Image: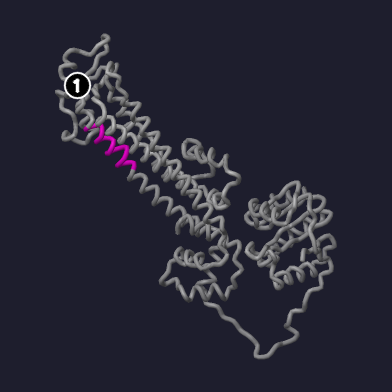
Amino acid sequence: MDLRGYIGLYSVLRESTTRVEDRRAFGLKYPSTLYPPLKQLSLWVAQSPHRDKAIDETIHYLHHLNLLLGIFALVMGIMTGVGLLSYSGDNPVNILYFLSMVVLLPLLTMLFAVVSMLRRAKGESLFLSLVPAFWLERVLLYFRQHTPKGLLVLRQDPEVVKWLLLSRSQMLSWLFSVGILLALLGVIVTADIAFVWSTTLQVTPEAFHQLLVWIGLGEWMTPSLGLIEQSHYFRLGEGLDSQMVAHASTLGEWWKFLAWVTLLYAIGLRGVLWLIAQWGLKRAIADATLRLVGVERVLSEMNTPQITTHAPTPEPHFSPQPAHYLQMSEALSSHYDRVLGWALDGVEIAHLNKHFGISSTESISVGGVMSLEEELAIVESSRGELLLYVKSWEPPIMDFVDFLEGLVSHAHRITLVPIGVEAEGYHPHPQALEVWARRLESLNYSKVWLKQ
């Protein structure tokens, strides 16, 4: 299951009106003995007609975002490399600056990334505030007219957000390091660079040589002790030491070691961590997929044998009689004191308000995983005329009836709007509307009106 499948499944679970029989038929066609749960869900999403166009919009957004940030990181890497290797002819290039950028800084950031991988994410933690990719994305979103709907789906699971940012940050760091390597190779080809090493600390050439052997993982790419002694720079005057000038042609040999450690740490080791982050993102999406509301029920309906019965002839006393709910509303008002959405998130409620041309003082999502205390607080603060969206294909359960009973005791008037799928203009099926009308008829609330 990838990002496209995860967002698509979220959309299909909320829009699909397939029957239990259809899901069982799908399960028989793709049995669980041959197809694991994630593969079953992927195939089910691929064959569902209720796919939201927001899926493609979100995938295109993420692709273009990664492309734009990748180009930015590569250019910044080239500019940084050129700045580190700038040589006017008066002062040589101190390799310690370059080594800090391609060895020390990558190791520190990779250590931070590994610690973040081992910790479980809990919302927008300190990790998010320290990742440059997070703030760059926020800046780019600021200039967009609206946030892609699928992006809001991803943000509902902190683990997916964490691994998505980890993967993106490793990619950008890798491209930044590639830019530094390109700058090194370009400067070496186009200019005559004199590399030296200089530090205020009391470090002997022998000790510095041992440090470079350890960093370079052996002697074969490490500069010789003689080259290290010749390139030890002391700034005691305006000019270079005469011995250093005499060996100027050999001072440029440092570039091989610098290129090697860049490949080893900033590119190679970072690339391995990038692959690990990609694997972690895939695992996080798989776990988040199985945690989506409704997935367990869908898989159960696909893989549980279904037994049905029917009578050979119609039995009139079992035939449902049409409901005659008297409080039916043909049209909606343009404004309500409060709009509520049962098991609908804020984005979906805003989209429905726009579709029906409704404005309200506030819109609130209710039901779902909301606690009893939270629902009670919403009920007690509800006054005036209310609009309540419900999914027409989901019958009114007791939790909803209890919530509606509380609203009736506080609100002046409640308009109940059963909605269908977006592809059908949110019009509910007549059979679904009949179920809601029959239930309201049995409750007999004088304040509740049903949108037909």
Please indicate whether residue 236 sits to the left or right of residue 344 in the image.
left
Instruction: Magenta stretch: give its range.
Output: 256-270
Give the quarter of the figure containing the C terminus: bottom right
Q: Is residue 371 above or below residue 22?
A: above
Residue 190 x/y as whole percent = 26, 29
Name the one closer to the observer, 441 or 79.
79
Residue 376 visible at all: yes
Three-letter code, disc 1: Pro
View extreme (front): residue = 190
Please indicate whether residue 342 sits to the left or right of residue 64 in the image.
right
Q: Assess whether residue 128 is covered by the magenta stretch.
A: no
Question: Could you tell me which residue is drawn at 58 percent across and 73 percent down?
Answer: 20
Task: Return the residue at label 1.
Answer: 205
Question: Could you tell me which residue is drawn at 68 percent across and 90 percent down?
Answer: 313
Residue 268 x/y as whole percent = 29, 42
Question: Could you tell me which residue is drawn at 85 percent across and 62 percent down?
Answer: 446
Name the one closer to the observer, 321 or 72.
72
* Magenta stretch, main secondary structure class: helix
Within the image, what quadrant is residue 247 found in?
top left
Q: Assess whether residue 259 is covered by the magenta stretch.
A: yes
Please indicate whether residue 311 sits to the left or right of residue 280 in the image.
right
